[in-house]
Image: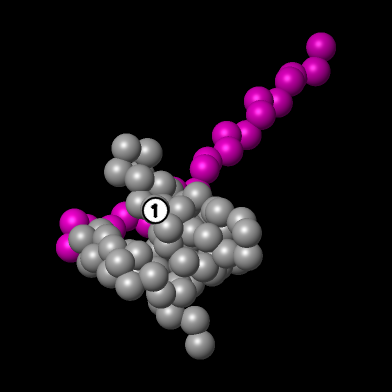
Amino acid sequence: MPAIAKPEKTYKVKRPTRDEFELEELADQLTEAKREETDVVLAVWGMEETVHGIITEMDSRTTLVHVYRNGDTVKVPFMDIMRVSNPM
């Protein structure tokens, strides 16, 4: 009887870790963008394309940031946001 090969282990790619200072700076940028209702571009971990729009809500219970653009609302987990910038 031939030997059966074990399936290889697959490892999920981990999100880069950030320190408390980086997370606080990111939260400040998001809060300011929401307060001023400015257009933002979010680089999100695990997404090939950026998320572009206006932040309408920051839900502390679910830790989701709601971004509105052209009639659509995209909900992005706070911990997955890598960078906040202004559109050019």
Q: Position of residue 8 (x, y in %)?
A: 62, 34
Q: Is residue 33 magenta?
A: no
Q: Which residues are magenta?
A: 1-21
Q: Is residue 20 above or below residue 87?
A: above
Q: In this view of the protein, which residue sits in the foreground, 2 or 86?
A: 86
Residue shown at 52%/41% (left/top)?
11
Q: Is residue 22 left or right of residue 59?
A: left
Q: Position of residue 76 (x, y in %)?
A: 47, 52
Residue shown at 32%/37% (left/top)?
61
Q: Main secondary structure of the magenta part?
A: loop
Is residue 85 visible to the viewer in this orientation of the structure? yes
Q: Is residue 13 magenta?
A: yes
Q: Is residue 57 left or right of residue 45?
A: left
Q: Which residue is mark 1?
A: 57
Q: For residue 3, which quarter of the picture?
A: top right
Q: Is residue 68 left or right of residue 59?
A: right
Quarter of the N terminus within the rendering: top right
Q: Is residue 40 above or below residue 22?
A: below
Residue shown at 55%/53% (left/top)?
74
Q: Position of residue 58 (x, y in %)?
A: 35, 52
Q: Is residue 88 left or right of residue 59?
A: right
